[in-house]
Image (cartoon, helix red, strand yellow):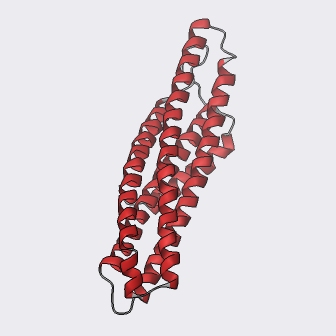
Amino acid sequence: MILISTARLALIAFGLTLSVGCANSPRAKSTAAVGSVSVVKLELERGATQLDTTIASLRDLVDQPASDLRPQFYNYRNQVEQLERASRTLASRNQSMKARTQVYFDAWEKNASAIKTPAVREISVERRLAARESFAKLTAAYATGRSTYIPLIDQLKDIELYLSHDLTAAGIAAVKSSAQDVYASADRSKQAFETVSEELTRVESELSAIETPTESGKPATP
């Protein structure tokens, strides 16, 4: 995964803000849809990075416990909290992406109904349906990834909760088996979100290239 660029995220957000001024144009709706996909992709990368950091803190606590376990435990607890926040942010960005993309597809459908030339109208319908199907694949991949991610966070929180009551050498030894299960779950989650990242990249590219045809057969302009 690529490290998050805060500047890049800010530029995308700025682009989405600018699109509001001409929100009724096909290009503005397309820009908003593409921008929202880019934001989800960046948040996904942020979440993956935070997952790595969280798992590393668990390994440090379980595999290399110090005589005073509190600093390692507090770090682990903090990383789990940050992972939860990243998960909530990603879910929010995903909902925004779905909403913006739906607006784009709805506008495309509405504009296509105004096309008088049958051949051009047919092309518009075919391309819109293909784009919808493509986005549906991304949605399915995201749902699969999230179905592995949420239980993983629950596992991490359960270990945190247990150790908050039994932060001892014996307590650490008792969660070693559970920690191994977490590592395996984390690997599955990362693999699932690698797939989501690939889908996001594909959809981002496809939507960036899409222009809504007009009656003349030329792309629509803002």
Residue 2 visible? The answer is no
Residue 4 image offset from top left, x and y in percent: 42, 60
Residue ID at (56%, 7%): 119
Which corner quadrant of the image does residue 63 belong to?
bottom left
Give the left or right position of residue 124, taking residue 44 as reference: right
Residue 189 against residue 171 in the figure, above or below: above
Q: How many marks?
A: 0
- Front-most of residues 4 and 22: 4
Residue 146 image offset from top left, x and y in percent: 51, 51
Residue 158 against residue 10 in the figure, above or below: below
Give the left or right position of residue 53, taking residue 85 as reference: left
Position of the C terminus, as image quadrant, is top right
- Front-most of residues 132 and 80: 80
Q: Residue most toward the top? A: 118
Residue 20 against residue 25 in the figure, above or below: below
Residue ID at (65%, 14%): 115
Residue ID at (34%, 73%): 59
Residue ID at (47%, 80%): 163
- Front-most of residues 7 and 127: 127
Residue 159 image offset from top left, x and y in percent: 47, 73
Q: Residue most toward the left? A: 64
Position of the N terminus, as image quadrant, is bottom left
